[in-house]
Structures are given as C-alpha cells and as structure tokens.
Image (tube, rainbow, N blue to C red):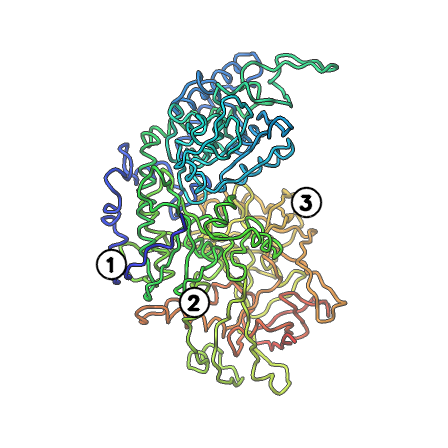
Amino acid sequence: MASKPGRRPKPPPEQQWEELLTFQHFQKTSLSRHSYGYAQGTMRALIESEFSRLRGITYLDHAGTTLYPQSQLTRFMDDLTKNVYGNPHSQHISSKLTYDTIEHVRYRILEHFNTTSEHYSVIFTSGSTAALKLVAEAFPWSSASSENEGSRFCYLSDSHTSVVGIRKIAEAMQVSSVSLKPEDILLSEKSNGAVYEPACETPHLFCYPAQSNFSGTKYPLSWVEMLKSGRLSPMTTPGKWFVLLDAASYVSTSPLDLTIHAADFIVISFYKIFGFPTGLGALLVNNRVSHFLQKTYFGGGTAAAYLVGEDFYVPRKSVSERFEDGTISFLDIIALKHGFDILERLTGGMENIKQHTFALAHYTYTVLVALRYPNGAPVIQVYSDTEFNSPEIQGPIINFNVLDDNGDIIGYSQVEKMASLHNIHVRTGCFCNTGACQRHLKISNETIKKNLQAGHICGDDIDLIDGHPTGSVRISFGYMSTIEDAQTFLKFIITTRLGKADSKLPFQVTPGETAAVTGEPVVQDEWVNKHETGKLGQEDGLLQTELDKSSMTTKETDFHPPATKPGGGLQIPSLTSAATLDGRLPKFTITNIYIYPIKSCAALEVTKWPIGNQGLLYDRNWMIVNHNGICLSQKQEPRLCLIKPLIDLHRKTLVVTAEGMDPIDVPLDENNEKENQICQSKVCADRVNTYDCGEKISDWLSKFFGRHCRLIKQSSNFKRSANKKHTKDSSHVTTASLSLVNEAQYLLINRASVLELHQLLNESDENGTKELLPMRELIERFRANIVINGTQAFEEEKWEEISIGTLNFLDGTILPVTEICDLNIILDSSLFLIPHP
C-alpha cells in the first residue's frame, strides 16, 4: 500500500483543537477492546513508583529501547548482594547455583512464548544481530551445481540492516540472495502459487520481521506455517523453505505464541522488552531443525572432547551448549528472571501491553492525520500500510514527516532539535531499515548512491538533499507510556506548526515542566516558513533603542529571511552596510562582553577582560560532569543556569554561587593539578584531558543538584585544536587552541539580527498583546561572548574578518598577527570588518 499523508477533511475550527487533546476524545478513539492502562493500578501510580526519573521527560523511542522499572533493578541488586554466582562452567556450589538459575531462565523464556524445551532450545547471544549472524553462519547452504540451482536466501525489503547483512555470508557460500517487497508476498499468498516438490530437499531460508521497526506494520504470522507447508513460496525455485523470524520489534509489546506460529528460528533482544539488561539476546531454535545447523568454530564450554595436535573435536549434545561459545553473560541472564517477574506484576502480561500501547498509538495517529493548516494542507505525512484500525496488524509505532503549508517536508533533524528543546525524545533517520525508508519515502537506489556522494551516511543529521528527505521521524510507545506523553507530543506539533499556544488548551507545555532551559534559544526560528515572512523595515523606534544610541546612520531596507538552498542549507542574501558604499570599512561598537567560566552555567558579564591563549581568559575552562564523567548540559539539567560563577583575578579564585547555597572558592591556578585525579572527558566528539577540582566543590554541587556531580577543569598542558581556517592569503593557515567550547574561541552575535528574531516572535503571538521574550533575555539565550550593534540583520554572515583594536579575528579565532599577552577586550571598543569578497 502507498504511504498515507492522511485524509483531507476541512480543517477543524479553532475551538475543536481543545477537544482533540482531551481525555474524552482519547476514549472515543480508543475502542472498548483497546484498553488503556492495567488492572494492577493507575498509570500515575506506575510512573511515580517505577519511573520517577521520567519527570519532565516525554520518552517516545521505545522501539529503540524501552525503559527499565526501578523495582527490577532493586530486586536484581538484592539478588546479587545475597547470593554468590560463580562461573557456570565450574562444578562448585556457587557455580551450580548459576547453572541452575540459567536453566530456569531458559524455561521462563520458553514459557513467555507459550512453548517448552521439548519443542525449542534457547541459545543466548549478545542480541538479535548476533543471533541472525549465527543462523547465517550455521545454516546448511547448498551451493549451485549442475544437479540443482542451489540454496536461496530471501528476505523482505522491509528488514533491518542485520537481516540484509546475511546476504554477504550467503554470497561467500555461492548462494543467491533476493529481496522481496511486502506486496509481492501478499500477492503470492492470494494466488497460492507455490512450487512444492517433496523430493527436492535443497534448503532455502526466508527471513521477515514479525513487525516492521520502521512503520510498526505487523506482517502475517500465518506466513510461517504456509511457507513450511509449501502453500506459500517466495520464489519458484524448488526446495524446502526454512523460516527465520525477526521478532525483536514485535515481542517488545506483543505476545508471540510459538505453539501456533512455530518458526524454525526466532531472534530477540531482551532490552526491547525490559530495558535492562542490554547486550543480551537469544536465538530460539525449533528442535526439529536444530540438527541441521552446522558449526565450524568451537569455543570454551562447547566441546565434549577435542585434541590439540590432531583434528579431533566432538561437540556437546545440547544445542544450547554447542553454540554458546565461552562463558555466557550469566549475571545479565539472571537479571532476566526479575524482568519477567516485574513485567507480569506491573502489567498482567503482554496482551495487556499490546492493547495499552496500541490505544495510545491509535489516538495519536487519529489526531495527527486530522491536523490541517488554514489552507487545508496536512501538517503530517504518515508512512504506514495501515490506518491503525487493529493491533493485530499495527504496532505502537508512528513514522512520519512534518510538512509546511505548501506540502514541503521539514527536515527531520530540525524536528528532532525542536522536540529536544521540549524534552521530547524521538528517533529520526532511516532506523537501520533502508528498504522501508526507500519504499515509503520513494527514494530510488540511484538517489541513495548520490546522497552518499553528497556526504550523507546512515545516522547523520543531513535530513534534506536537493529538497528531498533522506529519512523521517519515528515515535513509539512502551508499556509505561501514558496519555500525557501522547498529549505533550501532540501539543508540541500543534504549537510549533499551527501556533495554538493559548491557555485554553487542556494542558500546557511549560519550561518548568517539560521543556529544558538550554544554552540555545528556545524559539521557533528554524520553523518559520520562508513564504510567510513579510517585509520588515529596520528603521523604527525599537531598533534605535537596541542600537544603544549608535551614531551610525542606517539606510532603510527591506529584509527577506535567508532562502533555503537545495539540501536544506541557508543561502545568505548579499547584505552590505551603508558605511561600505563609499569604500570605507564599516565601524561598529561592542555593547556587551560575556564569559562563561563553567560550561553550560550562567554568564559573567564584564566591561573589560583579558585575552588568553584559548579565547577570553577562563572562558569555558570548567565543566560539571555526572557520576559517569559525562558533561552535563542544560538539556539534561536545566538548573545549571542557576549556577553563577564569578572570577576574582586578584585573588586568583573562581567563586561558585547559587541561591540557597553558601559561596565556595575554587583556585584558578593549577599548582595542585598533579595531585588531583587526571581524567578524560568528551566535548563535541573531542577527547579532552581534565583534572578533578576536588571533593569540596563536588559535595557542594552534589548537594545543589541532588545527585553526584563533580567539577573538572581542562588541563593546562592539553591542547585541543579547532578545525584549520584559511585566511585570504591561502598560504597562511592557523590552528586555534580551544577550551571546552563547542567549536570556536569566540562567539559573536549582532543585536540587529536578534532584534529581527524578536520581532518575528512577537508577531507570531496570536493576540499580539504580550512580549514573548524580552530582548535582553533573548540575547542571553544565544550565550555569545561578544555582542555588537550591527546595522542590518544577519549582515555578519558576510563578514570574513573583524578587528577589535589590535586583535584580528577570522571565523571566531584570533589570527596570529600580534602577541596576545596583556591584551584586553573592552566594552564600547570599536569593531572593524572585512566583508567576504
């Protein structure tokens, strides 16, 4: 079926937006057989007791991994503290306990899928990918010969990368591989045109997902028996078909009955079901075909006997022991027992989870496809083969792209960034499923190759190339997802695309609840439609105020926002200051100077400040890390903005302050650096050497944030280099040394540009009666070091170099034209620029 942009009814009147987002509307869309919640307790009680860490977060990537409940970890850790588990390959008491517990978990897994050890064996792997690879390596492929055509490997085009990768192993065995579109199999099913020759025993392997990880489409489990019985054949080649079922996505929210759908091989990953442990999966092998698997390598624990100097090896009889090379991850396997126990206690079973998650997906889908712009154009294009009518054919996954009112797709990277600012966690890209992505987004093979040449690879944020999407957005629900999660997401789409931000709606996304305070502007500038912006004169009273009584004259001009280049980039229009028309270099004034001693914390505004080797002295020299040494940002910890660092150059002290806390001093110098713990951290994919600032400041920060934190400082003997920048003299190249900044020594913004954004924001307010964000606060959101009083919005995009006194800058970096010691940047300093030629 074709991808569906949704029906095109008349856009609902404004008063109906309120109704769409009510719980009553949710109940109307959720048919009685699709129940929300569990008899074991309310969803609110479940979240408060098991997932309190989700407070302020809307997590919608359960198809990536679901989340573990607190009680699962508590019981597992209690188990570990009260028992001694030895290596299961030993024979002593603690090892026997481990072995017996593992065997019990195997039985529990089979029970979960309504089967027994009489019919299936469980082989533990590192995940579903490893399980797929195991089948590929052990399958008894038959190479083509004069007597027969050899084996075939067939797979659905809507398959995970790990399935498609099997074809390389098949190729090494001289076996042909063929991908089939879902509609081809469905047509074959209807025609019943199978070629079945009982005398031909050539083994073929067909792999398909029980549920698409791209769209949530559930493919018929009835195919399993039809393929095995010969009533359905992917190809006309005679032989015997074996079925490899990729159940990783399906079993995360749906029950699988192997008594009814007895596939030959089933692969699963347990983190999809429980959230913990990760790195553990299983291959379930039908005992009727286990003897077909041919193993080459043998590792520890798999041999009944072998000789070192002679080619003699006898494998163990148990298929599990034969294929589990080395010591399995036995503690993680023990954790599964608690996962099954807790999941059953919290939800009552997988059937309840299936109904609960589908109710949320069905409701969200019905609202999304109803969203319309005033001109009737859809806001969302959904990629699905169903209309979310039944959980038997559709899982709790919604794949889509956001459209503008002209029907053009807005890049998924922009959507994800905006969602992150609202603390909504979604997944974007092609989700390791290129086949489904191509099919739904209508991307040709040639386009995939051209996109690669253009620099796009799987998993990056290049979302549009020549105006065409390279991927999409995916949301997915888990057993602990709530109606509030769905409403928050829908509210996000409505407010950012339709501007319905008034208080009449049933709930409100507020920075204090679900939107993180970040170092980036929490605004809608990336979403402003380029066709909607009118001409905005710049010579008005507000501009005159914001230019801080600049003596420069400005020329009245019309501003048009940057147009979009093919590929989604910005095409900056030619902007030339009036002062350059007579050939003179334009002159500007610095209006504000900010430094940020501790990365992601509050700014320190100064009127004069020394220049260091890495930018403004002590700018972003420190950062706060969590217990794992990971740098905290305001996206994860909004209260970072309440930490106010001060620097006393005379006392050589960093003073850290926060409301409700006594100030604490941290030395600026590094005399004791060698005595402190040296560690490595990461900033924008760069490894940096740092040292720990001690226990006192750690205790202070931990008390303030309510969790363990530490303050670290970049080591003085460590040099982190920025990307090389070329000056207009191509023979001269400079490499800047960076502190803990993201990419440049200095960040500069133009008040005229911020003012333009300020005006656009205020115009986007429906009532126009309130200032959405004060100008000063908007400037602070950009966290710049230097603020200037430019004359035209976005003219700084055309600058190649700027000069402040004796300092010359190129793309945020000081050019090595002078010694920097004893130099300062001073408020009200003049600034000169050299435009791009």
Which secondary structure, mark 1?
Answer: helix
* N-terminal-most mark, 1 or 3: 1
* Tag 1 residue: 16
Spatial separation of the CA atoms under disc 3 and disc 2: 54 Å
Residue 444 vertical position relative to residue 116 in the rendered view, above or below: below
* Residue 429, x across and y down, in percent: 50, 50
Q: Nearer the viewer, mark 1 or mark 3?
A: 1
Spatial separation of the CA atoms under disc 1 and disc 3: 65 Å
* Tag 2 residue: 529
Give the left or right position of residue 179, taking residue 356 as reference: right
Mark identifier at residue 674:
3
What residue is rendered at 64% in x and 85% in y?
Answer: 583
What residue is rendered at 75% in x and 67% in y?
Answer: 732
Q: Nearer the viewer, mark 3 or mark 2?
A: 2
What residue is rendered at 43% in x and 42% in y?
Answer: 183
Residue 135 vertical position relative to residue 644 in the rendered view, above or below: above
- Classify mark 3: residues with Cα within 10 Å, few (<14), some (14-19) or many (20+): few
Q: Nearer the viewer, residue 666 or 534?
A: 534
Query: What's the amino acid at mark 2?
Result: Asn
* N-terminal-most mark, 3 or 2: 2
Badge 3 vs badge 2, beta-carbon distance below 8 Å: no
Q: Nearer the viewer, residue 740 or 98?
A: 98
Query: What's the amino acid at mark 3?
Result: Lys
Q: Nearer the viewer, residue 318 or 139?
A: 139
Residue that lies at the very extreme toward the right in this rendered image: 731
Query: What's the amino acid at mark 1?
Result: Gln
* Residue 818, x across and y down, in percent: 73, 70
> Is residue 713 something one can see in this rendering?
yes
Give the left or right position of residue 183, taking residue 86 as reference: left
Which secondary structure, mark 3?
Answer: helix
Residue 718 vertical position relative to residue 220 in the rendered view, above or below: below
